[in-house]
Structures are given as structure tokens and as C-alpha cells.
Image (cartoon, rainbow, N blue to C red):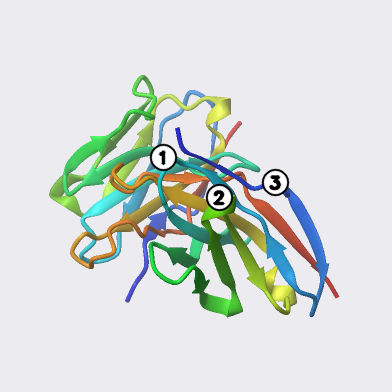
Amino acid sequence: EAGVVQSPRYKIIEKKQPVAFWCNPISGHNTLYWYLQNLGQGPELLIRYENEEAVDDSQLPKDRFSAERLKGVDSTLKIQPAELGDSAVYLCASSSFLAGDADTQYFGPGTRLTVL
Amino acid sequence: AQSVTQPDIHITVSEGASLELRCNYSYGATPYLFWYVQSPGQGLQLLLKYFSGDTLVQGIKGFEAEFKRSQSSFNLRKPSVHWSDAAEYFCAVVHTGTASKLTFGTGTRLQVTL
């Protein structure tokens, strides 16, 4: 079974440029999460989706960050415009109520963003 | 609010030695507890989890963890460390009732010397 897929793995951009990250969760997982991981820190939740609905986006900086999960499968996280402080690893995770293991999240490899 | 504390930022052990990584949580009831490992440039891999039942939990790669309610701890152990275990280890907690909202500790970086 394929795990959570993320692309790109690495991205280097100039500040003020836009950037987008893509995530495909484990097949059948209805819950999808985006996390931000700063250097030397644990991941912090940005947004959580239940199917197509964003049920927790309280930590998402909505002035520059946006996310979507059309059709309730894969998801895109966007930053526009990027700032120097956005340099971090962006992790995607998924979980499934149907598997009876709703509280276990499985993570992708992440996208390492560097803003110059 | 719930929180997770990993008091050791960096630990160095010799290959073949035993390992214990500490994790303490702050929460009124019994949370769900997890240990994840992150190798350089990689995502987080689930090592083990505790939801209920037996307080000694076995995980992958020879790791185990013990839930101690009286100490609010969930320490990770391995009897004999391999060089490939060098990585960052994160303890995490889900507050039951918050719909799978994971709170992570700041991590412990493990270095293994040969």
C-alpha cells in the first residue's frame, strides 16, 4: 500500500513569490492534515480536512496561506506571497475513521521550502 | 491546554547500548500517546502508540514504550541501539475529544557512536 505522497520534495523560491505544495493521502483516508515544521521543532497543525471540508483551520495564516481539497482526495497548500520566515518543512498526513484507527496519523516525506 | 515535554534535546549513545528517551505530558485524563521517528530529510514514521490496555507497548524496529499514569510519562526504550537508529524522535499526544489533534514535543535528537 502506498503511503502519503507529497511533491515537490524541495523548493527554493525568492521572497514574495507564490508556491504550492501537493499531497495525496493514503487511499481511503478521509482525513487530511497539513503541518508546519520549523527547524528543531515538532510539527504544528495548519489545517485539517474531513473529506472536502476544512474542519480546523484556526492555525492557518489566512492572509497568505490557502488550502483546498477538491473531491476529498488530494490537497494543495499555497503560500502567496512567501516570506523569509516561511522557510520550513511542510508535512502532510492522513488518517481514516473507517479503519477504526482515527487517531493515528500517517505522514508523508514533507516538502522543504527555502525562501531567499 | 495539553502539552508534551521532551526534556532531552540531544542524546548520544554507543551502538549496542540501551536507550531511553523521556516524554512527559500534561493532560487531565488519559490521552492517546505516540512516538514518531524522523530521519534526516524524511517525514515522520510511527514507531508505536498507546490508546488503552497494557501499559507496555511494543513497536517497530525493536522499540517499546511504557505508559505510567502516576508520572504522566510515556518513555521510549530500546535494549540495544543500532547505528541506523540515529534520528529525531518525537513524542505526541492526542487529546481525546479534539478529533485527532496531535500535539508534538520538541523532539530528541539521537546520535549513535560506533
Q: Is residue B71 left or right of residue B48?
A: right
Question: Are callouts 2 and 3 both on one chain?
Answer: yes
Q: Chain of mark 1?
A: A
Q: Secondary structure at mark 2?
A: loop
**Does the rendering let one see residue A74?**
no
Q: Chain of mark 2?
A: B
Give amino acid for label 3. Pro
Identity of the residue drawn at 45% across and 64% down:
B49
Give amino acid for label 2. Ser
Farthest top residue? A63
- CB of mark 1 within 8 Å of CB of mark 2? no
Question: Are callouts 3 and 1 both on one chain?
Answer: no
Please tell me which of labels 2 and 3 falls first in the chain.
Answer: 3
Q: Secondary structure at mark 3?
A: loop
Q: Nearer the viewer, residue B60 or B67?
A: B67
The quadrant of the picture occupied by the C terminus of chain B is bottom right
Residue designated by label 2: B72
Residue designated by label 1: A45
Viewer-nearest of discs 2 and 3? 2
Q: Distance between the Cα atoms at labels 3 and 1?
A: 22 Å
In the rendered structure, find residue A115 and report the number of the disc placed on it: none
